[in-house]
Image (cartoon, rainbow, N blue to C red):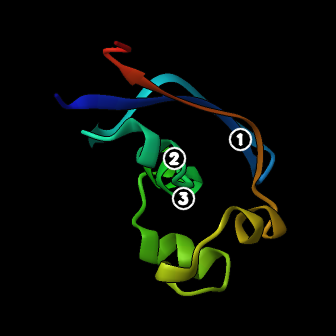
């Protein structure tokens, strides 16, 4: 059974706060594996309406090498990033 991957987030970029509750990130059939993934790049791209290539250029890296540490080093600070699944059964 597929479950929706949802998240609540808030991050600061360029002095502006971006936040959402219940943002849709995709579907999964294995929440245990999905829970281990770093969704920070997906969240930023969705909020700023950009692709991963554009995000990689913003933080001076390659799109396949985007990590939360590199994102935070570039000045994008997460206050909240909570991942959850629906339905939760």
Please tell me whether mark 2 sits on a helix, a strand or a loop: helix
Q: Residue at x 47, y 81 (%)?
A: 64
Q: Is residue 29 above or below residue 4?
A: below
Decide: few, some or many residues near mark 2? Use Cα within 10 Å; few <14, some 14-19, many ≥20. Answer: many
Q: Which mark is residue 11?
A: 1
Please tell me whether mark 3 sits on a helix, a strand or a loop: helix
Question: Looking at the image, is mark 2 or mark 1 earlier in the sequence?
Answer: 1
From the image, tell me which residue sits under label 3: 41
- Locate the C terminus and report the quarter of the image it occupies: top left
Please tell me whether mark 1 sits on a helix, a strand or a loop: strand
Decide: few, some or many residues near mark 3? Use Cα within 10 Å; few <14, some 14-19, many ≥20. Answer: some
Query: Is label 2 in contact with label 1 (beta carbons under 8 Å)?
Result: yes
Q: Marks 3 and 2, Cα distance to the nearest angstrom?
A: 5 Å
From the image, tell me which residue sits under label 2: 43
Where does residue 76 sit, x and y in percent of width and height?
A: 75, 56
Q: For this view, does 76 lie left or right of residue 35?
A: right
Most foreground residue, 26 or 51: 26
Q: Residue at x 69, y 61 (%)?
A: 68
Q: For this view, does 68 lie left or right of residue 41?
A: right
Where does residue 9 sit, x and y in percent of width and height?
A: 62, 32
């Amino acid at each position: 059974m597929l479950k929706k991957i949802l998240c609540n987030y808030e991050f600061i970029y360029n002095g502006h706060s971006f936040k959402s509750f219940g943002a849709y990130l995709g579907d999964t059939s294995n929440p245990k594996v999905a829970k281990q993934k770093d969704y920070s790049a997906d969240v930023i791209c969705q909020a700023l309406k950009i692709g991963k290539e554009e995000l990689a250029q913003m933080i001076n890296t390659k799109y396949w090498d985007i990590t939360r540490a590199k994102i935070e080093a570039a000045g994008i600070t997460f206050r909240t990033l909570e991942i959850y699944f629906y339905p939760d059964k």
